[in-house]
């Protein structure tokens, strides 16, 4: 995928004056529900109407989607509103049925992306298709796995590709359902700038009152679009009730969102920006120096532990330190998520340094 300028053409074909928006219910529940939501979203900024037909569940017994009949409802919604339709596929049979009912956009979910065999099966079923195919990030923060899925689809001669960032699972308790780990989709975008990048704030947040915040952050980072779960009665939705918004709320989100300019040609702006970037570079150099000094102290601790035959990892000390730095970080305007990620990396590097010394 080293040279893929054609990938963006499908997005340009829409000729939109705003980011692409994909919206609709987490799950198709009834024909009436699907058609009502579709009509509510018609003539808004929504270009593609989505609904889940097959719903993967961690444990059996939950609502796993209405199946093929829901595709009939989606087709009716398309005929009635003129919007394109989209759904998730997880098997070759899902692909076959979706294509038979004229689904325009097929996306591969996070759990499926994590399974290369499943992605290859879907790629084979979609070989050479002219449909739009979107790949969600895998459940775990693994850029290589995400890229591998893209390569399988690209090698199947699928030209209309894009990716969806829906956040990553974690056992940590955070304000997000799935932590964004923004640096991962940004790295993917840096490698393939012609690949449309869509944010899924519904799954990142898991909470409807955070949808706007994460959507704005995505647009600030030059994302190409949003996929937002929308329901006429979110509180009584059959799946993911807490993260769905009403069509009315969605339209208000559209009004409140601000699309940022990618560049600015003003000489005054560029001079100020260059000055601030120089300050960032100088500060980064100081951070590197401080981290180097910290690791030298860790080396000394490693030598002391070795001389007294003490274990490298000290869980009580680590927990106390983490509580302290999180509190200090909050007092200085830094998020808990950032402090956790930063100090976990620092702690891991310290352990590596100490283990090298202890094992000599």
Image: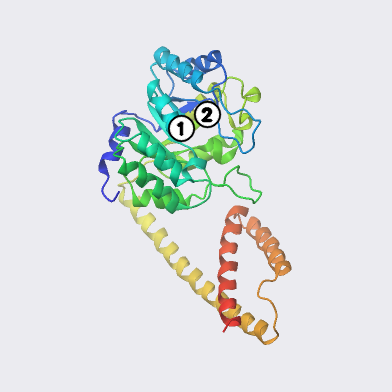
Q: Residue at x 66, y 49 (%)?
A: 173
Q: Find out whether the residues at labels 1 and 2 contact each other: C-beta distance under 8 Å.
A: yes
Q: Tag count in the figure?
A: 2
Q: Is residue 138 above or below residue 71?
A: below
Alpha carbon of mark 1 to alpha carbon of mark 2: how far? 7 Å
Q: 218 and 119: which one is in front?
A: 119
Q: Is residue 348 above or below residue 110?
A: below
Can you see residue 223? no
Looking at the image, residue 277 sits to the left or right of residue 306; the answer is left
The quarter of the rendered structure image containing the C terminus is bottom right
Q: Could you classify mark 2 by the number of other residues whose Cα lies within 10 Å: few (under 14), some (14-19), or many (20 or more)? A: many
Any mark on residue 323, and which?
A: none
Any mark on residue 54, and which?
A: 2
Residue 304 coordinates in the image, percent (x, y) = 66, 84
Q: Residue at x 53, y 73 (%)?
A: 290
Write down the quadrant of residue 319 in the picture.
bottom right
> Which of the two discs, 1 and 2, labels the residue nearer the N terminus?
2
Looking at the image, residue 104 sits to the left or right of residue 344; the answer is left
Q: 13 and 312: which one is in front?
A: 312
Q: Could you classify mark 1 by the number of other residues whose Cα lies within 10 Å: few (under 14), some (14-19), or many (20 or more)? A: many
Write down the quadrant of residue 123 in the picture.
top left
Residue 16 coordinates in the image, percent (x, y) = 34, 29
Residue 91 coordinates in the image, percent (x, y) = 46, 34
Q: Is residue 347 above or below residue 11?
A: below
Q: What secondary structure is marked by label 2? A: loop
Can you see residue 295? yes
Q: How is the image coloured?
A: rainbow
**Residue marked by disc 1:** 89
Q: What secondary structure is marked by label 1? A: loop
Q: Residue at x 41, y 31 (%)?
A: 106
Residue 351 coordinates in the image, percent (x, y) = 60, 72
């Amino acid at each position: 995928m080293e040279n893929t300028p054609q990938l963006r053409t499908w997005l340009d074909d829409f000729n939109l004056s705003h980011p692409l928006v994909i919206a609709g219910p987490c799950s198709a529940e009834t024909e009436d529900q699907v058609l009502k939501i579709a009509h509510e979203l018609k003539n808004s900024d929504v270009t593609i109407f989505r609904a889940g037909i097959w719903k993967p569940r961690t444990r059996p017994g939950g609502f796993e989607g209405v199946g093929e009949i829901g595709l009939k409802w989606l087709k009716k919604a398309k005929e009635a509103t003129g919007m394109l339709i989209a759904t998730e596929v997880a098997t070759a049979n899902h692909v076959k049925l979706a294509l038979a009912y004229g689904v325009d956009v097929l996306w591969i979910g996070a759990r499926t992306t994590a399974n290369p065999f499943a992605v290859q099966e879907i790629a084979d079923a979609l070989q050479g298709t002219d449909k739009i195919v979107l790949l969600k990030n895998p459940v775990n923060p693994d850029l290589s796995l995400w890229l591998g899925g893209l390569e399988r689809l690209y090698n199947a001669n699928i030209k209309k590709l894009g990716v969806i960032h829906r956040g990553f699972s974690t056992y940590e308790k955070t304000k997000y359902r799935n932590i964004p780990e923004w640096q991962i989709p940004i790295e993917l975008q840096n490698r393939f700038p012609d690949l449309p990048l869509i944010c899924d704030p519904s799954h990142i947040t898991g909470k409807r009152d955070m949808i706007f915040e994460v959507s704005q952050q995505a647009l600030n980072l030059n994302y190409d679009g949003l996929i937002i779960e929308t329901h006429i009665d979110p509180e009584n939705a059959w799946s993911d009730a807490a993260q769905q918004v009403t069509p009315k709320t969605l339209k208000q989100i559209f009004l409140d969102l601000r699309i940022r300019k990618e560049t600015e040609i003003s000489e005054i702006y560029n001079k100020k920006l260059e000055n601030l970037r120089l300050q960032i570079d100088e500060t980064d150099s100081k951070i590197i120096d401080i981290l180097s000094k910290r690791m030298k102290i860790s080396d000394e601790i490693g030598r002391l532990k070795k001389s007294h035959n003490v274990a490298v990892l000290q869980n009580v000390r680590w927990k106390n330190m983490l509580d302290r730095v999180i509190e200090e970080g909050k007092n200085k305007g830094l998020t808990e998520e950032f402090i956790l990620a930063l100090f976990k990396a620092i702690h891991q590097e310290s352990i590596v340094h100490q283990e090298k010394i202890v094992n000599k």
